[in-house]
Amino acid sequence: MPGLGAKAILDILVGVGDQRDLPNAVRGLEALGFVSGASLSPPDRSAFLRRPAGEGEPPINLHLTLVDSYQWLDLLRFRDKLRADPGLAQTYENLKRRLAAASEGDLDAYTAGKSIFVAKVLEVSHS
């Protein structure tokens, strides 16, 4: 998102139209150098892959999920909330910086801290 501080990693959300296509998409991405990581929801509904930095290429985190799934809709809703509220976006950026410093490279701890914030923002938007 423009103006939001972030790590030098491309974080990409890709929607898959049919659940049956997910395994083929994962295999295709693995053939391109992506490595499968932990899923954020049941593995038959989403996948998380990473590609390390290459010669002149940044690292990539790729989230595959079903279009119109709760995960898809929540990620887009969260993005839209940040775009609509610069103060909220700044709060999120500050949190990410604090978590990055405190987690000392522990991705699970970093993600857990962000997840609490995201859940609160989405809870407000659902009410």
Image: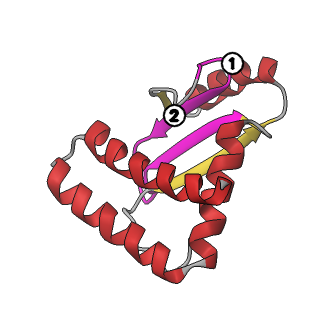
Is 104 displayed left or right of 9 in the figure? left
In the depicted structure, whether residue 58 falls above or below residue 60: below
Q: Amino acid at mark 2?
A: Leu
Q: Amino acid at mark 1?
A: Pro
Is 18 displayed left or right of 96 in the figure? right
What's the CA distance linking mark 2 and mark 1?
A: 12 Å
Q: Is disc 2 surrounded by few (<14), some (14 to 19) or many (20+) residues within 10 Å? A: many
Dividing the picture into quarters, in which one does residue 82 lie?
Answer: bottom right
Which residue is identified by label 2? 49
Q: Please state which of residues 65 and 55 is positioned toward the viewer in this rendering.
A: 65
Magenta span includes 110:
no
Mark 2: secondary structure: strand
**Percent x, y for residue 25?**
70, 27
Query: Bounds of the magenta span?
Result: 42-65
Q: Please state which of residues 56 and 92 is positioned toward the viewer in this rendering.
A: 92
Query: Residue 14's mark?
Result: none
**Percent x, y for residue 71?**
64, 39
Residue 54 visible from this viewpoint: no
Which residue is identified by label 1? 23
Q: Is disc 1 surrounded by few (<14), some (14 to 19) or many (20+) residues within 10 Å? A: some
Residue 27 visible from this viewpoint: yes
Classify the position of the N terminus by image quarter.
bottom right
Q: Please state which of residues 127 and 83 is positioned toward the viewer in this rendering.
A: 127
Magenta span includes 53:
yes
Considering only order in the chain, which callout, 1 or 2, is on the residue closer to the N terminus? 1
Q: Please state which of residues 119 and 49 is positioned toward the viewer in this rendering.
A: 119
Classify the position of the C terminus by image quarter.
bottom right
**Percent x, y for residue 23?**
69, 18
Residue drawn 21% across and 46% down? 105
Mark 1: secondary structure: helix
Q: How is the image coloured?
A: secondary structure
Residue drawn 58% across and 59% down? 124
